[in-house]
Every structure is written in structure tokens, then in C-alpha cells.
């Protein structure tokens, strides 16, 4: 897009899908359960709202083959649709389930607060049996409190509430690492000594405890779940821990809304390494598509195209003819014409949206494509 005038550039942008910070402040982008846990690489819920209103009707079912943090599932539920999602990351599926499960909030709040109080009474657990990774990234007290919370929440809570506790534990584990306050997204190594903090503009000390985070995130999680419960609909919603290239869906959706991973950008398992280590989750990073660890060389891009084409071909086989498939992607390498050609999908329309990004210490803007496709199987 270099060298083009701004007027020419913006003439191609769908302004209904592009918002400034003033038009769409963070409080709206992260409303209720959408900010239940930090997650890199998700799209804003307002995008899904518009796609659902344009291409779907209440009572239909939408599918997201890259469910991520569950944005599509949550917004589909709010608008009265059934929803099914799929992801190779067991953590993503856990987070999506917690966001969309209907809870008896009074009992859940009482149980979660009770576990935190028990952790306070019992004190930190022994850390000797923890993994080397956990012992290197946490101060002894912080790790002991997390391990005690894991132990007590598993023993005291029923299954749905224990899943909520896992999300709280993961969120607390993210904040309690031995990492600078300004570098929670991409810490490279543990920091055990005082450091100059770019966020607070002063010398800060590494975190030594987890308890304050367990308390804070218990309260915030209960508030967000309770807020969502006031608009939640009694619709079918399911997050499948499976490979989207192979998955057989339990229902037939009427279309797809998704934002696939970009090649060579994010390692989705690694960004939640603390959750995998603390909660002892199954790690399937080898099945990620386009992970940063794979790079962006010619062979990696070829594998990305083949994998994406397989995902969308598998989805197309399980959708009605002419079903809409909405793909939000920054296709800077022009890979999607080839992907769509091998997927049984026909591109009906393409528009661009302007993205302002303000996350942590990163600031910038870029453009995404919205690909509106239809199932042809031809």
C-alpha cells in the first residue's frame, strides 16, 4: 500500500468495520467475559456482531475453526445463535468453555471465595515437585501459593467451577511471574533483581507473591461472568479440542466466522506457557498452523497454505451449499487466493478494515482484509 494517497486507501475501507479509539474505547472492546483472560491475536467482538447481523439469523449455528479466546462463540450466544468452535490448544478451549457456560453465580462466587480463603489459611504448598520451568519463573512463595490454589480448587470445587478456578489461576500465574511489569506479553527470561520499569518510570522489584492476584482476579472473574449471565441465551455452544483439519462437527453450522492465525506471528501455546505448566495441560504445539517458531520461509508458507486449505475444505464439506464463510486476515503475503482455490470456497467480496493497535508497549496500525466467501465445493 506504500505510495498511495490516504484518500485512495480509505476509499476501499469498510468504515462499518473500522473504529478509532474514541469510537470504540477499550471498555467496549473488552466488555464482560471478553476480557476474562489476556489473549494475544484476538479480534474485537464488535466485528463478530456485524458479521452475525449481516449473514446469519437467530436460531442458526455458526462455526469458528480457530476458536481462540471464544469471541465468536460469545457473540453468537448473545445474538441468539448456536455456536461450535474448534482449537488444538486445550487452554483456548478451556477459556472458551468458561466464558460460555451458564453458572449458578451465587454458588460459584461463594465457592471461589472459599478456596481463596483456604489458600490464605493453609499457606504456600511445597514447590519441590514443580517443573523446572515453574521454579525458574516464580519466587518460591508465589509458586507455592499457586500450587496450593491448584490443589484446593481441584479438591473442593465441582467440575464447572473448577474450570473457572483454572482460568483464575492462569491469570494470576501470568501476573506473578518473575518478569518486568512492562513485559508481560513477551518476557524473554526471568528477572530476579530490581529493574528500571518503563511502565512505572521507576525502579521496581519482581513479584514475590500470587495471593493478591488470586484475590483480585477472583473478584473480577465473578463480576464478568455475572455481567454476561444477564444477557446470556440458552443456546447450544461447544468448544471442541480438536484439529480443524480433521474434526467432525456435532451439528451442521450455517456458516463460518473466523480469524485464522497469521504465518510466523504468534506461538499460541507458548504465549500461555505458564498455564500449561501450572495446570499440567496437554501441549499440542506441533499441530499449530503458522506458529512463529515455524518461521516465514518458503517451505513454512507452503505448509501454511496447505494446512489452511485443508481446514476450510473440511469445514466446507460440513456446511450447506452457498453458506457464508467470513475470514478476517492480514494477508500481506497474498496467500489466500491459493488457499480458497483449494478449499471449495468462492470469494464473493473483499473489503479492508483499518486497525489501530494499542497493546502494552506496542503501538501501531495496520490493515486487515475481510474475505466473504461462499461454499461451492466445485
Image: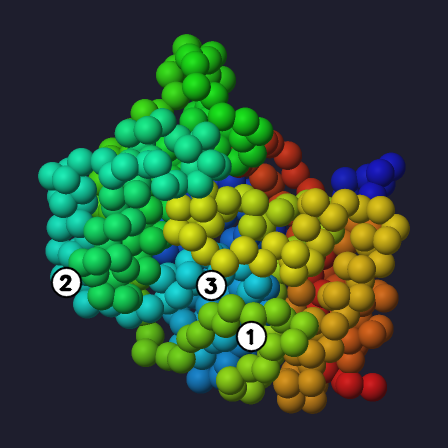
The answer to which of 136 and 343 lies nearer the viewer is 136
Looking at marks 3 and 2 on the same chain, the residue that comes earlier in the sequence is marked by 3
Residue drawn at x 11%, y 39% is 121
Looking at the rendered structure, the secondary structure element under dot 3 is helix
Disc 3 and disc 2: Cα gap in Å?
Answer: 23 Å
Disc 1 and disc 3: Cα gap in Å?
Answer: 14 Å
**Quick check: marks 3 and 2 in contact, CB under 8 Å?**
no
Question: Please, is residue 372 above or below residue 20 in the view?
Answer: below
- Which numbered disc, 1 or 2, marks the residue closer to the eye? 2
The image position of residue 272, as x and y in percent, is: 50, 46
Looking at marks 1 and 2 on the same chain, the residue that comes earlier in the sequence is marked by 1
Residue drawn at x 69%, y 45% is 292
Looking at marks 1 and 3 on the same chain, the residue that comes earlier in the sequence is marked by 1
Per the image, the residue denoted by label 2 is: 107
Per the image, the residue denoted by label 3 is: 93
Q: Quadrant of residue 229?
A: bottom left
* Residue 48 left/right relative to 226: right
- Which numbered disc, 1 or 3, marks the residue closer to the eye? 3
Residue drawn at x 65%, y 89% is 320
Disc 1 and disc 2: Cα gap in Å?
Answer: 31 Å
Question: How has the structure been colored for display?
Answer: rainbow
The answer to which of 25 and 69 lies nearer the viewer is 69
Looking at the rendered structure, the secondary structure element under dot 1 is strand
Q: Quadrant of residue 365?
A: top right
The image position of residue 325, as x and y in percent, is: 66, 74
Per the image, the residue denoted by label 1 is: 63
Amino acid at each position: 500500500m506504500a505510495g498511495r494517497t490516504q484518500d485512495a486507501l480509505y476509499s476501499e475501507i469498510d468504515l462499518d468495520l473500522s473504529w478509532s479509539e474514541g469510537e470504540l474505547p477499550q471498555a467496549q472492546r473488552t466488555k464482560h467475559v471478553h476480557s476474562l483472560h489476556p489473549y494475544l491475536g484476538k479480534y474485537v467482538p464488535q466485528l463478530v456482531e456485524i458479521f452475525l447481523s449481516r449473514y446469519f439469523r437467530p436460531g442458526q449455528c455458526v462455526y469458528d475453526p480457530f476458536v481462540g479466546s471464544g469471541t465468536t462463540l460469545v457473540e453468537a450466544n448473545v445474538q441468539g445463535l448456536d455456536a461450535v468452535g474448534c482449537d488444538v490448544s486445550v487452554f483456548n478451549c478451556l477459556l472458551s468453555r468458561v466464558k460460555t457456560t451458564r453458572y449458578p453465580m451465587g454458588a460459584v462466587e461463594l465457592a471461589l471465595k472459599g478456596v481463596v480463603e483456604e489458600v490464605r489459611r493453609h499457606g504456600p504448598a511445597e514447590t519441590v515437585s514443580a517443573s523446572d520451568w515453574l521454579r525458574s519463573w516464580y519466587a518460591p512463595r508465589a509458586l507455592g501459593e499457586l500450587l496450593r490454589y491448584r490443589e484446593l480448587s481441584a479438591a473442593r470445587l465441582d467440575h464447572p467451577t473448577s474450570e473457572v478456578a483454572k482460568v483464575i489461576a492462569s491469570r494470576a500465574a501470568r501476573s506473578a511471574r518473575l518478569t518486568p511489569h512492562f513485559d508481560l506479553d513477551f518476557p524473554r527470561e526471568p528477572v530476579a533483581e530490581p529493574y528500571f520499569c518503563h511502565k512505572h518510570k521507576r525502579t521496581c522489584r519482581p513479584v514475590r507473591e500470587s495471593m493478591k492476584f488470586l484475590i483480585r482476579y477472583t473478584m473480577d472473574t465473578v463480576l464478568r461472568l455475572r455481567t454476561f449471565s444477564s444477557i446470556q441465551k440458552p443456546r447450544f455452544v461447544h468448544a471442541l479440542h480438536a484439529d480443524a483439519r480433521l474434526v467432525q462437527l456435532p451439528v451442521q453450522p450455517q456458516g463460518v466466522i473466523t480469524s485464522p492465525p497469521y504465518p510466523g506471528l504468534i506461538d499460541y501455546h507458548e504465549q500461555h506457557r505458564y498455564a500449561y505448566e501450572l495446570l499440567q495441560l496437554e501441549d499440542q504445539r506441533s499441530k499449530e498452523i503458522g506458529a512463529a517458531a515455524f518461521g516465514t520461509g518458503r517451505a513454512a508458507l507452503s505448509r501454511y497454505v496447505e494446512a489452511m486449505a485443508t481446514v476450510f475444505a473440511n469445514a466446507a464439506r460440513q456446511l450447506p451449499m452457498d453458506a457464508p464463510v467470513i475470514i478476517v486476515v492480514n494477508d500481506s503475503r497474498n496467500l489466500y487466493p491459493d488457499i480458497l482455490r483449494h478449499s471449495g470456497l468462492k470469494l464473493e467480496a473483499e473489503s479492508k478494515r483499518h486497525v489501530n493497535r494499542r497493546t502494552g508497549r506496542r503501538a501501531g496500525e495496520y490493515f486487515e482484509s475481510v474475505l466473504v466467501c461462499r461454499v461451492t465445493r466445485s
